[in-house]
Image (spheres, rainbow, N blue to C red):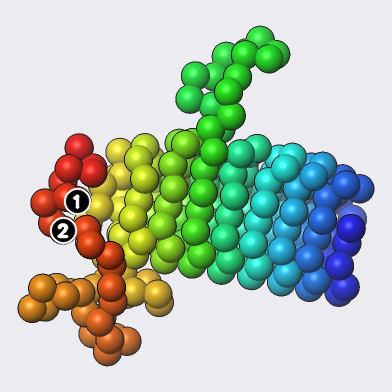
């Protein structure tokens, strides 16, 4: 089903069993497979591949050449930078039928930088930010700033993406002028999570 005010470039390939929300734009050479669901007011860039049964929330921006494979669920207001990629099998082999889908969950407000790879079976918490070129091999908690190969937590960010400062045991955004509750992840537990 295709919603109201949807733009689909003539070169895009959209399966008739895909759901496309109101106001969404799908650009050149994108492919959207069967049973996938794209929310309202999303922007799907050039040469994006959205596999079957993928769910994408509202107001998601997917830049050029991103691959979103079966098993991935993406929340609202997520940004996926150019060429980022999701995997969906921890032990990939070529013969047909030799795979086991690993589920990946991207919560609301997450930003993933260009050329990042998200290994399947993990969750990236709300408003987390993944740096360009990173390889995510573990769960990333909400508001975490993670980058590198493998990605490690380097700090925390606010909902606008500004890096937080730790002040009197709390995380504070100088730009937003507010305290951000990053959950009960202590400095010690961060090291335990990421090693």
Taking depth in this image into account, of 179 and 175 the one nearest to the observer is 179
- In x, y percent, where is residue 43? 69, 65
Q: Do the CB atoms of the residues marked 2 and 1 lie less than 8 Å apart?
A: yes
Furthest residue in direction front, as rendered = 184
Taking depth in this image into account, of 151 and 143 the one nearest to the observer is 143
Q: Considering only vertical position in the picture, is 10 above or below 70?
A: below
Question: Circle 1 sits on which residue?
Answer: 190
Confirm whether residue 113 shows in the render: no
* Res. 20 image quadrant: bottom right
How packed is label 1: few (under 14 Cα within 10 Å), some, or many (20 or more)? some
The residue drawn where x is 8% and y is 78% is 168
Q: Quadrant of the N terminus?
A: bottom right
Furthest residue in direction left, as rendered = 168
- In x, y percent, where is residue 51? 71, 40
Confirm whether residue 176 shows in the render: yes
Q: Considering only vertical position in the picture, is 189 above or below 155?
A: above
- In x, y percent, where is residue 137? 36, 37
Q: Quadrant of the C terminus?
A: top left
182 on left or right of 132: left
Question: Circle 2 sits on which residue?
Answer: 186
The residue drawn where x is 20% and y is 74% is 171
How packed is label 2: few (under 14 Cα within 10 Å), some, or many (20 or more)? few
């Amino acid at each position: 089903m295709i919603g109201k005010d949807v733009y689909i470039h003539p070169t895009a390939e959209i399966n008739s069993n895909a759901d496309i929300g109101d106001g969404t734009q799908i650009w050149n050479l994108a492919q959207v497979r069967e049973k996938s669901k794209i929310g309202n007011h999303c922007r799907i860039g050039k040469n994006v591949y959205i596999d079957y049964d993928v769910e994408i929330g509202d107001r998601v921006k997917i830049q050029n050449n991103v691959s979103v494979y079966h098993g991935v669920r993406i929340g609202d207001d997520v940004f996926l930078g150019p060429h980022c990629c999701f995997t969906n099998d921890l032990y990939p082999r070529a013969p047909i039928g030799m795979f086991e889908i690993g589920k990946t969950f991207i919560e609301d407000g997450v930003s993933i930088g260009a050329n990042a790879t998200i290994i399947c079976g993990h969750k990236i918490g709300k408003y987390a930010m993944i740096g360009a070129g990173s390889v995510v091999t573990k769960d990333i908690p909400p508001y975490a700033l993670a980058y590198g190969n493998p990605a490690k937590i380097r700090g925390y960010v606010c909902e606008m993406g500004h890096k937080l400062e730790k002040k009197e045991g709390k995380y504070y955004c100088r730009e937003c002028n507010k305290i951000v509750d990053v959950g009960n992840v202590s400095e010690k537990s961060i090291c335990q999570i990421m090693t």
